Image (cartoon, helix red, strand yellow):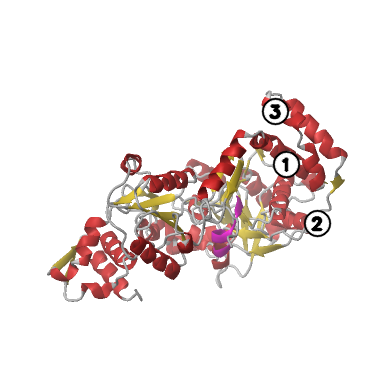
Amino acid sequence: RYYPAFIDVRGRRCVVIGGGALGEEKVVKLLECDARVIVIAPEVTSVVKGLAAKGKVEWLMRQYRSGDLAQAFIAIASTEDDEIDRQIYGEAEERNVLLNVVDVTHLCTFIAPSVARRGEVTVATSTGGASPALARTFREKLESSRILEYADLAPVLARGRAELRQRKLRVAPDHWQSCITEELLDLVQRGDETTAYKMLIDGLVAESSEVEEDLSNVEKVSLVGAGPGEPELLTVKGLRLLETADVIVHDRLINNRLLAMARPDAEVVDVGKIPGGGRRQSDINNFLISTARQGKRVVRLKGGDPFVFGRGGEEADALVAAGVPFEVVPGVTSAVAAPAYAGIPLTHREHASSFTVVTGSLSGKGGGNSPDWETLAKTPGTLVILMGWRNLSDIAAKLIANGRSGATPSAVVSWGSEPWQMTATGRLDSIADIAKSQGLEAPATVVVGDVVRLRERLNWFESLPLLGRRVLVTRTRNQAGLLSRHLGELGATPIEIPTIDVRPPHDYSKLDEALAEVSEFDWIVFASANAVRAVYDRLVATGRDSRSLHGVSVATIGPATADAIVSLESLPI
C-alpha cells in the first residue's frame, strides 16, 4: 500500500511532536538531511535541549495545539497519547501534510523505513508497519554483509558515467552491471582507483555505441538588452525573463542591481570582455548552446541592445546553426539613452532631422568594416559614436579633414544613465582634450552636432540633488527597497547593507498565551510594521484571524506601522 520514495526535506519545515527517545531519533535523522525542524513537547531529551540551545531546532515547550502543522511539509508524532495522535492526524489530513505516527500504522500517510547508509548509497527497508523489528534485522544483516561495501564504487561509477556522456557514448544497463565486479571493488578498497577507473572505462567503451543527440529537452536562449546601465530602463519582458532564468550570462558592464533581480538559485556567469582580453566569442557561443541543451532557461544579458554593436547577431547565428531556439528582447541602446540623460535630444526641429550611429573602432578587418569617415563628415544631422573613447582624437581629426567644421558643438557622455555620469562639451577640434582633462573615461558616448547646444537648458539628470552620492541603507532587506528607490530617483547610489534581521522566536508559547487571552486586554501597542506582520502571521498559524482582536484598542508607533495594520485588515485572512 505504500509507494517507496525518497523525500527531499532540505530547508523544509518538518514538525516533530513528542520529545522522548523516539522523537529525538527522528529529530537527529531530519537534521542529517538539512531539514528545518520544529519540536513540540513540554519536555525533551538532553540531546534535543542541546540542539535547541545551539539554534539547530526550534523547540515549542508545550503540548500540541491545533494549527501547529500550518506550512509544515511533513510531521512525525510520538506522543503515546491516542487522543492527541487522532487530533494531529485530523489536522494533517486537512492541511495535506504527510504524517508518520510512530507505531500507529492506521494513522500514517508515510512510513519511516529502516535505513542503511554507506557513502553515496542509501538502502531503505520497510515492512509496511507490520514489524519494525524485522526491518531492523534486514538492515543489520545488510550492514554486516559484503553487499553494502559495493557502495564504495559509487564515486568511480559516477566519474565513468560523466565521461561517457562527454564522449557521447551509450552503454546498455546489463553491461554496466557486468562491469561492477569484486575485482573492481578490491582495487578501490586497496586505494588503487586509477587502475580501477581504467578497467571500468575500458570495459564500458568496448561495449558502447554512439548516442544520437537528443534535442527534445533544449530550452530557448533569450538575448536580452539590459539598457545603458540604469536598472529601471530594462524592459518589462526583460525583467520577467531575468527573474525566471536558470542561467544568466552577462557582459562586464552590467549593473549589479540588475543581477540582484535574478532568482537566488540562478547561475550567474560573467563573460565580459576587457580591452585586450576576456572570453573569446566562440567560447561564449558554445556555452550558450551547451547550457540550453541541458534544458536550462538561459538569459544572455547584453548592455544596451543585443543587435546594436553587441554581437548579438553573431550569437543568434550560432544558435540557429546549432538548432537552439532563441528570442531577442530589444534594449534601450546607449546611443539614445546617454545623450538623453545628458539633456541632448538627437533630433530637434530647429537643429537636426536625422541621426547616424557608428562604432568608433578604427581597426576593422582589412579596413572593410571601419566607418566611412569621409561620408560621415558630409552627412547632415547628428552623429553618435559608440566605443570611440580611445580613438576620439583621431576620429575628430578624420571628420575635420573630410569637411566637418572644427567648431561643431560636441559632447562626450561617460557612464551614461549611471549615478556617476559625467558629461563634457566643447568644439569638435578640442573635445577629446577637454573630456580627458575633466576626468572622463570609458564607456563613453560621443555626440557631434548642433543639438549639443540644447544641453545647457535641458540638463535634467546631472542636476539631481544627490547625483553621485553613495547612501548606506541599513534597513531590513525586505524593507530597504522603497527607500532605495526614492534615493535613486534623487540621483544617489543606494548601498543596501542590512544591520537588522527579523527572525521568528524559538518559542512561541508566550505570544500564543497572550493571543489566546487577547480579549482581556484593553490595548495592543505595535512598535513596528514587523511586529504587526509577526502577530498576524501567528494568528493565522493558530487557526485564528483579525476578528480575535475585536473590542481591543490598537495603537501604533509611526505611520508605517499604521499602514501595515490597514493593509493587513484588507486581506482575506
Image x and y of residue 309, in percent: 67, 55
Above or below, 19 against 559 in this view is above
Compared across the picture, whether 160 is left or right of 262 comes to right
Q: Which amino acid is tagged 1?
A: Ala
Label 1: how many Cα within 10 Å (few below 14, some 14–19, many 20+): few
The residue closer to the viewer here, 327 or 417, is: 327
Q: Are marks 1 and 3 in contact (CB under 8 Å)?
A: no
Dot 1 or dot 2: first in sequence order is: 1
* Magenta run includes residue 241: yes
Q: At 38% across and 65% down in the image, what residue appears?
A: 86
Residue to which mark 1 is pinned: 162
Q: Residue 188's mark?
A: 3
Mark 3 → mark 2, Cα distance in angstroms = 44 Å
Image x and y of residue 503, in percent: 33, 52
The mark lying in front, picked from 3 and 2, is 3
The quadrant of the image that shows the N terminus is: bottom right
The mark lying in front, picked from 1 and 3, is 3
Q: Which amino acid is tagged 2?
A: Ala
Compared across the picture, whether 250 is left or right of 186 comes to left
Q: At 27% across and 55% down in the image, what residue appears?
A: 62
Label 3: how many Cα within 10 Å (few below 14, some 14–19, many 20+): many
Evaluate whether residue 141 shows in this view. yes
Dot 3 or dot 2: first in sequence order is: 3
Q: Which residues are magenta?
A: 240-249
Image x and y of residue 258, in percent: 51, 55
Image x and y of residue 157, in percent: 71, 38
- Report the residue that reaches farthest toward the left: 522
